[in-house]
Image (cartoon, coloured by chain):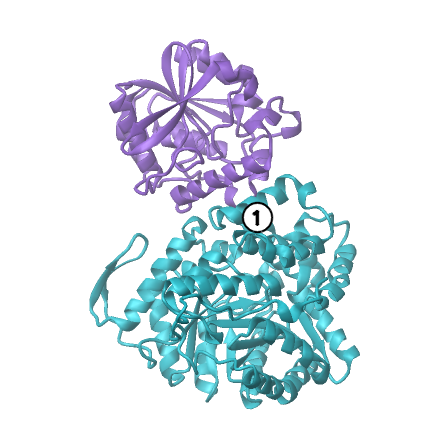
Amino acid sequence: MAQNSQEWQEETLRVDQTDLVIVKGGTGRPLLVLHDELGHAGWLKWHSALAREHTLMIPLHPGFGRTAAPEWIRTIRDMAGLYSIMLRQQKLAPIDVIGFSLGGWVAAEMAACNPDQFRRMILVAPNGIKPTQGEIRDIFQMMAPDQLRNSVLDYENTEEFASLFGGIGPEQFELWEDARAQTARLAWQPYLHNPSLPHLLEVVDTPTLLIWGKQDSFVPLNAGEIYQRCIRGSRLVVFDQCGHRPEIEKRADFLRETQSFLA
Amino acid sequence: MHISYFTERPYRYVPNDLVIQNGFFGNPNKYFDPVKGGQLLNEYLDEKLLAEELGFDGVMLNEHHDTSFCMGSVMNVEAAVLARITKKVKIALLGNPLPIVGNPLRLAEELAMIDMISGGRLVSGWVRGGGSEQFASNANPAFNREYFNEAHEVVVKAWTEPGPFRYEGKHFHYRFIDPWVLPIQKPHPPIWIPGLLSPETVEWCAEHRYPYIALATFLPPTVDLWDFYRDAAAKQGYQVGTENFGYLQKVYVAESEEKAHEIAKYDMFGGAGIGYSLFGQPQWMFPPGYNSKQATRRIARQFTAPDATQGSPWASAAAGQRSAHETRQNISAAQVEHRSGIWGQTRDSVESTRGQIFGSFPEVEKQFQIICGTPRSVLPKIRKVLECLRPGIFFFWQNDGPIKREDRISNLKLLGTEVVPAVREMAKELDLKSPFEVQPGSRPLPPSGKPESVGSLQPLAGIFN
């Protein structure tokens, strides 16, 4: 993270009594980035690449370590509601959004509530929909370091893997435990999905790009296919030899797809 | 003193190698034979009857799920049987795992029925449930303490407030509470809280004037936690006494030292020392949001910087012993760390792990985690424990691990006929009053306002050095 510290800064936004910590960097049209269930993994190469043409806004989810969790946020829909309040308050809508895993689910819930708040939506291996083939992997039955390692297809040969979260250390472990606890509060049951979401996505006509790793062992590709069917006009892009983190496992492909979609 | 008898009621036919490899939790239940299990459950009920016959004041049950370690998956069922077949003993349920029951009103009704059938002999206790229990019941671990507090409120209200009434909490919602089964004991059955020295729980006990039962914990930090209870009690305006404290102690007796050691050693596999860390693998024992910040910090070091805690499993055990000198918040965390120790070790083979488990027996014995010997030789050690902790409630814990039935019975008989009467005399001499003799929370503070300690490290001087 440190080597890129010039490229981003943190600011705090007061949204409905919550002091939302936001990592912000880049220039151009704002891009809302919703991080995954382990938290914001630090400023990586893909951030730098997208930041050349977009102002990245990365809110640190309430309860995931840095932003305190308000008591009223009890579901992913509630969290989606908080971000909707933020967009309205900051007059950011319609905004481009990219959400990863749990963050993708948040974006999908936001779109299902009000598709007009997004100009374009990219969902990277979001959970939120229960696949009919395969299962969403139980991240709570593994320790956080294993959760991280298992999120990619081959962590030993994934270039930026060691940079994620600045490495696996005791302080980071504690932050992960905060993130995991909050994920449990929001999505323990039904497990990492909302049974009504496939129906509610019916209203979404936002241009949507879905990105999936073919070998994603956390959220099976089948969930992506269901998303694709539920969101009218959406496109599903699948990378072979890729797990749950296409942004680092297939960075070049990921950037090509996202940059052209957002252009 | 109230003297009670406890075993885990293990399923004894599980392949030991499987447990050494995987721990007690998470093994496929194809290894479970309900015919054998049923036979064992009946043997355990009979042993409770024998304990009553031998003069124990009470019998204690506990609850675990999905594990051969303890078959008490729904201990209220066992308690209901005991309520009918026993005549005098108190039936202590230590405890019902409040966060995982899902419907605390039904729990209040079950317990009321046990109290009614037994003629008012129920002692009710609550636990948070182990990490693995959260998975076994799909109870959200991040709400564990909230569920605990709210379920406790529902149960006590259902027992004490005239119905019908309404309860709408954060997690539990009832618009009609009016049970037509209520405990005989008024205002409600005694409530005792067992635990592994969590300061949050101890403080909560002091606030509610519930006796706290330390479950075979290390002695020095237990004394320290007694003082923590003392201070929390003083804030509530009362002086703690022996009636506020209980202790669970493993004791094995046989006619010879050799025989006693032989059977006690099996217990290493059933839950003493590092054998206890076989209870469950870390991913099941530390689910998200379940642990305090302090415990999480310890686990964080253990799982990301193993060098920081490297050493023999007994290094972490010793940390547990030393922790009376550490900050109080670290005490239960050290206990947690110790009990996960084995998974951080290099485990070359089943044989080497087995060697490690049984090889630590001398340390286990030295630290009083198991007291074993002839009825005569165990008494001075038990006396040390009583002098140190001064508990008004004392549970004998034995017969876990792969111990033969005849050994279990002779062990229990010797305990009942020779050890229990002597311990009773000691308790009289040491003035260890139980909660049935002195109402917990009824002692006034000394005129100085400064509360007195109940436990003391002094009797242990020189033992652990």
Give residue B42's quadrant in the image: bottom right
Quadrant housing the C terminus of chain B: bottom right
Q: Position of residue A161 (x, y in %)?
A: 60, 26
Which residue is rendered at x = 77% and y = 83% of the image? B256
Amino acid carrying label 1: it is: Gln
Q: Name the one closer to the observer, B334 or A22.
A: B334
Q: Position of residue B169 (x, y in %)?
A: 28, 55
Q: Name the one closer to the observer, B317 or B26.
A: B317
Per the rendering, the colour in which chain A appears is purple
The residue sitting at the front extreme is B448
Q: Position of residue B387 (x, y in %)?
A: 60, 75
Tell me which chain appears cyan.
Answer: B
Which residue is rendered at x = 51% and y = 27% of the image? A41
Which residue is rendered at x = 62% and y = 39% of the image? B304
Question: Pointer 1: what residue?
Answer: B283
Q: Chain of mark 1?
A: B
Q: Position of residue B136 (x, y in %)?
A: 49, 57
The residue sitting at the left extreme is B164
Give the total number of marks visible in the rendering.
1
Q: Is residue A27 left or right of residue B311?
A: left
